[in-house]
Amino acid sequence: MSDALKSDLDYPMINIPGGEIALRDDRIKRIWKAEIKPFLLAQYPVTMELYCAITGKAPASIDGNQRPVVNISWNEAICLCNLLSQKSGLNECYSLNHDNEEIICDWESDGYRLPSEAEWQHACKAGTTGYRYGEIDQIAWYQENSEGKIHQVGTKEPNAWGLYDMLGNVWEWCWDLYDEKVYGSYRIFRGGSWAEEKRSCGASCRRRSHPSFSIDDLGLRLARSL
């Protein structure tokens, strides 16, 4: 194993306490609650450096290796989780049901996975009650201060639980389907990005995309079950 894949793969994880979170879908005016078990969430989005260390791909440039990886589809994110679990000697979270081609998550596995959207929102808010956990220019890269580009992780202030870039910089894939009856296999992503207006960079803002699509301001952050 290379030096880049030691010490929890140079990808520090934060212990997130359990709790209850209220989620909402403004599109259909629905509000629901979710119970969250304690779990681990990465302090930063997956960087290009870590992505290249996991996959064996060479970085396009050294200058950008501490920026979040983007243009990665949900399907690719799932594969990356399993590959990282393999390299770390952990049990894979994801498997394929060959009968219906459905991806199954083993929530009891000790491997890497995407957070659920409830986990993501709970971790983002970090015990706060507002739309954001701080003043936006202090915590997030977004349309008004990003100069039209992605930025190195960890250069804005973290939330109360020590998580950086939960809002702004890049959107982050979550596990959940958005609305299977209406949108089929489309998956949720959260958090806003460098290209978004202020209103899109909030703890409860929800977006969706097809699991095979990749977007230039959409990345991922990894979780593990305890």
Image: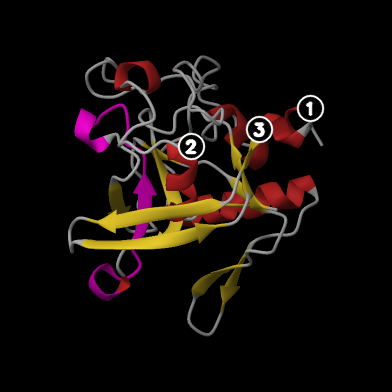
Q: Residue furthest bottom?
A: 99
Answer whether residue 114 is magenta in the image. Answer: no
* Disc number for residue 3: 1
Residue 192, above or below 160: below
Above or below for 9 versus 82: above
Q: Residue 119, relative to residue 147: is it above or below?
A: below
Residue 97 visible in the displayed image = yes
Q: Quadrant of the N terminus?
A: top right
Whole-number angstrom distance, CA of label 3 to CA of label 1? 12 Å
Give the image quarter of residue 28. bottom left
Residue 190 colored in magenta in the image: yes
- On screen, residue 207 versus residue 171, left or right, reads left
The residue pinned by badge 2 equals: 126
Give, as a three-letter code, the residue at label 2: Ala
Q: What residue did someone put label 3 on?
A: 11
Asked whether the residues under the numbered discs 1 and 2 touch, taking CB atoms below 8 Å apart as contact, a structural biologist would say no
